[in-house]
Each structure stands twice: as structure tokens, then as C-alpha cells.
Amino acid sequence: MPHTLTLLGTKGGPAIRPGGPNPTSMLLTLCGRRMVIDCGLGVSRGLVETGMSLKELDLVFITHLHSDHVLELGPLLHTAWTTGLDHPVTVYGPPGTRAVWTGFLASLAYDIETRIADEGRPDLASLVTVTEYGPGVILQEGDLQVEALRVDHPPVTECFALKFSGAGKSVVFSADTAPFPPLADFARHADILVHEAMLPEGLDSIISRTGNGSRLREHLVASHSFAADAARIAQQAGVAVLVLNHLIPADDPAFTEEHWHAAVRPIFGGDSVVGRDGRVITL
């Protein structure tokens, strides 16, 4: 099984628009495992479009509990179950993830109980284990290791960058974060750093379409990173490839891939990739 990263949803924020990209979700294939990172709206369809059968699902990681990263966690697990999932699945998430899952089970109790009785399905709740994590190594399984680093995403305190290492490769996901210098050490010499990114000149566009005016701008600037910030972290870390993801704005035709590359090129000397739903990157 080749080592690949597939971007399933690449826009920042929970809103979706006609013809535009989906919120955050990714599929990492490493050490013979398929691992889902974040479950924004559209993750189930995105996984199916890669050719993966949802009944093969077994490892899911959530970086934080903003809706554009966790909204489709329950529906993904339920849809995998209705597809034929019959083996254990482990979900790694920050504190509060277990409550998200149990709340989903409660909301779909009628459907789940009916399908167990009427279709002979296994008990969905017993198939899923939620492991809530903090900083440090959160999974060690053979050659595969996953580590977490708390990043700066106010007002969310339980938000974590994740590093996946194995088979001589390493991939780091920044999660949502303001510029965070410790991330450079965390991502040192990674093959791929997937880092969130905004364009300064694109903020007016997203604010005018979404509303909330100055309050939204204040949040975006305090809690997120511009593309140039991501480039600085990547350059300091000495990573091979920088992937810009969780793009703001992601669906404004006034901004093309060249705008993103222009923001990164003067700072980062490695290869850069601009996130697009369905884009596959080979390690």
C-alpha cells in the first residue's frame, strides 16, 4: 500500500457554497493503515470517492471540536456501520470527543436500535472506542507513532497538531492555530507539513459573505495563520513539502493558486502545494 495523503476537504470554516470545497478532512495512508484526520462535513463522501470502502474504517483522529472538524464524525461512523462495518474502530480526539459521540448515539437511538433488531447488525456503540488525548505520544503501534502538540487556537484550548511517523516518513498536521513557533520543532524535517493558511487580502471577501464584521475579523487574526506564517514555520522546520490547507478564502474565484504560491515563495524554499478537495500527495 503506497504512502499517500489525500485532501478530502480543504476550506476553513463550516459554511459550504455551490461548487465550492468542503470543510476539513484528510486521509493518510501510512504503515499499511488508512487514517482519517478530522471529520468536517463531506468526509464520508470524500472517502468513498477515493475508492475506500467505509467498512474498512478503523482509525480516526480529531484535532479539536470546532464543527468544521468534527461535524460528520458520528455520521461517518454510522454510515460505515450501515455499509457493513463489523470490526472495532478507535477515535482519538481531545477532551469532549466522547460526549460528541455519545450525544450522536442518543440522537440516532431509534434508527440504531431498529437496524440492530431488523437487519441483524452488531451494536454500533460497542464497535467504537473513543480515546481522549493530550500532549505527547497518543498511539504507538508497530512502526507507527502518533504524537500530539497543543497549539494556539483561542478560545479553544484543547486543539492539537498531530505528527504521524513510520516507515521512514513523517507527516505533520498543524490543526487550526495562530502562528506557533514550537510547531517548527515538532515538524522538524517532516516529509509533509499540512498547515492552515489565510490570505490577508481575502479576509474582506470572507467577512462580507459570512457576516459578523469586525468580530469575525478579530477571531480570524487572533486564532489563525496567514500563508506567510505557515511558510515561516515550514522553513524553520526544514520540511520537504508544505501543504496549505483549511484555506481562507477557499471558494472566491478572485484568488487563484498563484496568490497562495506568491505568499509562500519568498519565504519557503521547499515545494508547496495548495489544498484542493481530492488532491493526492505521495510521500
Image (tube, helix red, strand yellow):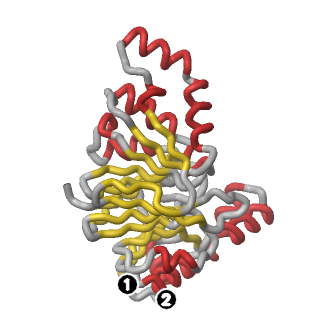
Quarter-of-image position of residue 57: top left
Q: Residue at x 28, y 60 (%)?
A: 143
Which residue in the structure is indicated by mark 2? 267
Secondary element under disc 1, as helix, strand or loop, is loop
Which residue in the structure is indicated by mark 1? 270
Mark 1 and mark 2: Cα distance apart in space = 9 Å
Quadrant where the image shows the N terminus:
bottom left
Please give the label number shown on residue 42.
none
Q: Is residue 263 left or right of residue 190?
A: right
Label 1 CA crowd tier, 10 Å (few <14, some 14–19, many 20+): some
Q: Residue at x 59, y 74 (%)?
A: 199
Secondary element under disc 2, as helix, strand or loop, is loop
Quadrant where the image shows the C terminus:
bottom left
Which of these two is toward me, 222 or 266? 222
> Taking the image as drawn, is residue 79 in sight?
yes
Which of these two is toward me, 200 or 173? 173
Q: Residue at x 58, y 31 (%)?
A: 102
* Residue found at the very far top of the displayed protein: 118
- Residue 214, image x and y in percent? 80, 65
Q: Residue at x 38, y 33 (%)?
A: 80
Q: Where 92 falls versus 100 (above or below)?
A: below
